[in-house]
Image (cartoon, rainbow, N blue to C red):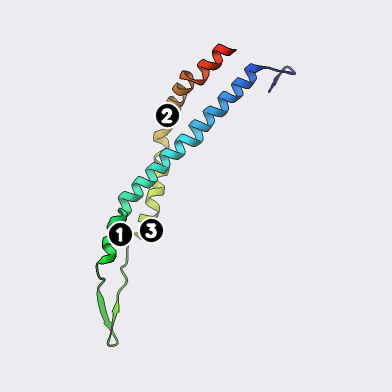
Amino acid sequence: MREGGQFTPAVFTTSLDCLIWQCLASVIIPGNIIGFFVRFSNKLINGSEDDEDESKKTKPKKSVAFGKKKEEPKVDQLAGVKRFAPTFIGLASIPFIISPIDSSVEFLMDSTYRQIFEKLY
């Protein structure tokens, strides 16, 4: 925070500008957008909670083994895909969201923070 051995307001405002921009463009906004994609795709792939409740109400098939009726467990052959697909969709969205987020944060910073500190210093 020193320039030539001297603390200057310009160094402070530039450092704060970088910190705010990086927090918004690299952490906060992408994290929320990717999280939205993961939650939304998870809901689409795995169904809503209401659908799960309905499937629990239906009775599974019964088989006879050694004279006793035994319930067969339902086998979900796509369980691995259903488990990891939302994560892959979230990761695949990253290249498409980088440029719009950077542009939006740049516009936001130009419209707010940079105008305020430009007048002060």
Residue under label 2, please give it. 99
At horizontal 31% and vertical 52% (from top left) the residue drawn is: 45
Q: Position of residue 57 (x, y in %)?
A: 26, 66
Find residue 118 and report its image quarter: top right
Which of the image's four quarters has the C terminus? Answer: top right
SS for dot 3: helix
Distance of label 3 from label 2 (alpha carbons): 32 Å
Distance of label 1 from label 3 (alpha carbons): 17 Å
At horizontal 33% and vertical 50% (from top left) the residue drawn is: 43
* Kind of residue sitting beneath label 2: Ser
Residue under label 3, please give it. 80
Which residue ends up furthest to the bottom in the rendered image? 67
At horizontal 42% and vertical 26% (from top left) the residue drawn is: 104
Residue under label 1, please give it. 52
Q: Position of residue 32 (x, y in %)?
A: 43, 39
Mark 1, mark 3: which one is toward the viewer? 1
Of 6 and 86, which appears nearest the observer? 6
* Kind of residue sitting beneath label 1: Glu
Do the numbered discs 1 and 2 sit on residues whose CB atoms are within 8 Å? no
Q: Residues within 10 Å of mark 2 (few under 14, many from 20)?
A: few
Counting residues from the N terminus, which is met first, the one under dot 1 or under dot 2?
Answer: 1
Q: Position of residue 47 (x, y in %)?
A: 30, 53
Find residue 120 and report its image quarter: top right
Please say if 81 is above or below 41: below
Please say if 24 is above or below 72: above
